[in-house]
Image: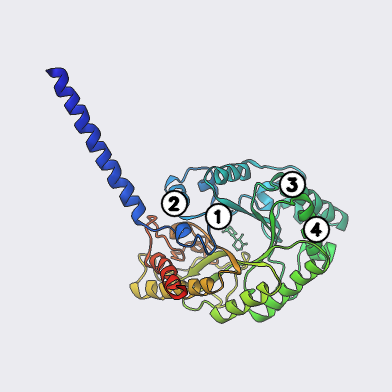
Amino acid sequence: MIKRYSYIFIITLAALGCATNKKTTTQATQTPSLKETFKDDFLTGTAMSARQIEGKDTAAVRLIKQQFNAVTPENSMKAEMIEPEWNTYNFDMADKLVAFAAKNNIKVNAHTLIWHSQLPAFMHHVQNADSVKQYVEHHINTVAGRYDGKVYSWDVVNEALNEDGTLRNSVFLEKLGPDYIVDAFRLAQQASPHSKLYYNDYNIEEPEKRAGAIAIIKKIQAAGVRIDGVGIQGHWRADNAPLAGIEESIKAFAALGIEVMFTELDLSVLRNPWDNNTADVSATAKADPGMNPYANSLPDSVAQIQSKSYTDLFKLFLKYKKNISRVTFWGVNDGQSWLNNWPVSGRTNYPLLFDRNFNPKPAFYSVIATASSNKAQTH
Ligand code: XIL
């Protein structure tokens, strides 16, 4: 008798367990996912911080698996991290990222091989052209070679342009001359024949800088070297994303026969001290409480402006979905965005689709809604 009662008890417990499980599953699937919503249109990605790559930020990792099918390391594959000393490499984080992505069926866009910023300290002392040449060759052969085919793509060269479309002065331009970009792509192509190769920059939706990017791409192509795509970073203000320029750039880059991507999308709700549109990481200003108007919360009116801007952008992305291969956000949630500390440190910004508790914001639902209006139009 006792035995029979305990059986009933166990069965009841099991049934209750199933019911609760079912409830959690249904709740989890109630939030739509970006990667499902746009699966026939383009990849949807996020930047991943070191804590996320190491699995320490479990809530973020859960959200990444649920929402995204592409990731870009926010800092872990930059030169200062991956080659901290001359010809001495630290692949720890990059290996972890590649393993995480493979396990979860996520594509890695590796960022970045040649960039004037976040260079290892030793590069500031390298004076002669031969050493710079040697560094570039070593770095690209070793890093791009190790991850050939294991990463989906590389930002081979990042931010080589000034705002007027001329080449930015950097150790690479100064010591190697203007051909350094074509040479970097050639080296990357040899070291990494199975990963895609991209040029990445900010403000290349502006006419002069766009022309500079077109010149770079044409020069690579004319040299018979492979370039698969161009990344428009997309660090814009929520109240004035430059839609017309973006559309022009999508058309102009697509006409060169390459993929177009939005690689670091975030829509700041805060002014920068100069009221310009720079995304130069070296443009910094001191902390200033007067420049931090939403320290406690984001007013609804501003959230609505941001949602509208995200809507307009995604409508545009969908209009050109044949040419656009990926849209990546620069961070998982608002609290983790670099824009809380750049260009002014210690501010409270709200540039992404998920709030500080990983909950979807109105902007998230606006972005999801663009997909159904797109389907309604095409059917
Ligand atoms: C930023 C990171 O988000 C910060 O954590 C870091 O301190 C500086 O760099 N353009 C790029 C990115 O290509 O690599 C930059 O990322 C943002 C601007």
Under mark 3, the amino acid is Gly
Q: Residue at x 47, y 52 (%)?
A: 64
Horizontal relation, residue 290 to residue 17: left or right: right
Q: Residues within 10 Å of mark 1 (few under 14, many from 20)?
A: many
Q: Assess mark 4: CB under 8 A from ligand 1?
A: no
Separation of marks 2 and 1 at Cα, in angstroms: 11 Å
- Residue 171: percent from the left, percent from the top? 78, 62
Would you identify the image quadrant in which residue 10 lies? top left
Mark 2 surroundings within 10 Å by alpha-carbon count, few (fewer than 14), some (14 through 19), many (20 or more)? some
Residue 70 circle label: 1
Residue 268 drawn at (x, y percent): 48, 70
Q: CA distance from mark 2 to mark 4?
A: 36 Å
Mark identifier at residue 221: none
Q: Tell me, for residue 66, which label it has, or none.
A: 2
Q: Is residue 139 above or below residue 179?
A: above
According to the picture, the residue beneath numbered tag 3 turns out to be: 145
N-term mark: 2 or 3: 2
Disc 1 residue type (three-letter): Ala
Residue carrying label 4: 186
Q: Which quarter shows the N terminus?
A: top left
Instruction: Report if the CB atoms under discs 3 and 4 are less than 8 Å apart.
Output: no
Res. 43 in view: yes
Spatial CA span between label 1 and label 4: 25 Å
- Give x and y (percent) for residue 8: 17, 27
